[in-house]
Amino acid sequence: MSDLKLGIAFALTCALLIGLVVPVLAVDYNPDVSVGQWVEYGNHVLDGQETEVNRTRVEVVAVSGKEVTLSTWTEYRNGTDETVDKIYNVETGTVDGQPASFPGGAIIAANLNEGDAIPPVDLGYIVNTTETRTYLGVSRSVNIVSYSLSGEGYTLSETFVYDKASGMLLELEGEAVVGEVTQTYSHSIIDTNIFEEPEPTTSEGIPVEYLYVGVAVVIIVVAAAVIVLKKRSKQASKTPK
């Protein structure tokens, strides 16, 4: 029975090790947007006054693996406009290949939870809280990211609110203090099509249920192997020499 007990112990150890992997796989930095989805922002305010920006529209024009290309169209109050395209990597936290110095992107990974790190993870920014808010008459689960930076003569504090399901920015507010001058600024969503049912994607993490099935398979296979080896050992001991 000692061999059988050893086999069972080995199987349980394998199960434990696989179980420890589950929390690691739970944080998977993937986008969950599709080409043609967009968010339009208004209410561009600086120190309580309207800014020269009338509205902005951020549209998904390409998705490839961890990268999302966003086209940002800005309409100014003087009648002019401009369009800028940027590539965001939601796993590395880079914009056009360069690491972001703070969490200020138009998009982060989808389906993050409270406490999850925001790439670039070495900067230490996290999802501070996850809660439900109402935008455009629709209740959405949102991830809130807040941070503060300070240096010689300045302090910067910002709060970003991201749609949890898509990772798209819904609103931003901030405060910058330089010397004795303080400025506050903000903008927020005024229209979008991201609240519609998204197209299914294939870039999903491994479901936890599959891991549990894997644990059960490991236990069964190892236990069966131990029993077979035990029987063979007994048969070999009975064979005349």
Image (cartoon, rainbow, N blue to C red):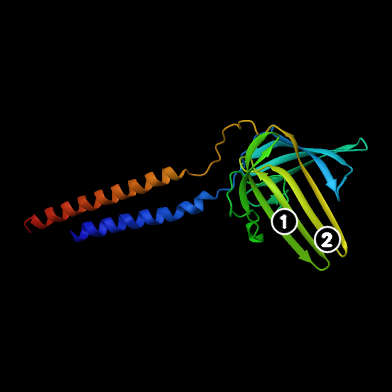
Task: Name the residue rendered at 12%, 53% in the picture.
Answer: 235
Report the side of 5 relative to 200 (left or right): left
Q: Residue drawn 50% across and 50% down?
A: 25
Q: Quadrant of the C terminus?
A: bottom left
Q: Is residue 229 above or below residue 54?
A: below
What element does badge 2 sit on?
strand
Give the distance between the C-alpha atoms of the residues marked 2 and 1, in whole angstroms: 17 Å
- Residue at image point 54% right, 41% down: 204
Near-viewer residue (221 or 204): 204
Q: Which mark is residue 212?
A: none
* Residue 167 image position (x, y, % from top left): 65, 43
- Circle 2 packing at 10 Å, graded few (<14), some (14-19), many (20+), is some
53 horizontally vs 131: left or right? right
> Which residue has dot 1 on it?
102
Q: Name the residue that disc number 2 marks.
A: 177
Residue 20: percent from left, percent from top: 44, 56
Q: Nearer the viewer, residue 66 or 213?
A: 213
Mark 2, mark 1: which one is toward the viewer? 2
Name, please, the residue furthest toward the right: 78
Tags 2 and 1 in contact by the CB under 8 Å rule? no
- Which quadrant would residue 119 be assigned to in this image? bottom right
The three-letter amino acid code for the residue at tag 1 is Phe
Query: Outermost residue, bottom direction?
Result: 152
From the top left corner, tell me how far across and down residue 23 is, in percent. 49, 53
- Residue 108, percent across and down? 66, 47
Q: Quadrant of residue 175?
A: bottom right
Lower position in the chain sequence, tag 2 or tag 1: 1
**Circle 1: is it few (<14), some (14-19), or many (20+) Cα within 10 Å?**
some
Kind of residue indicated by mark 2: Val
- Looking at the image, residue 66 lies above or below residue 226: above
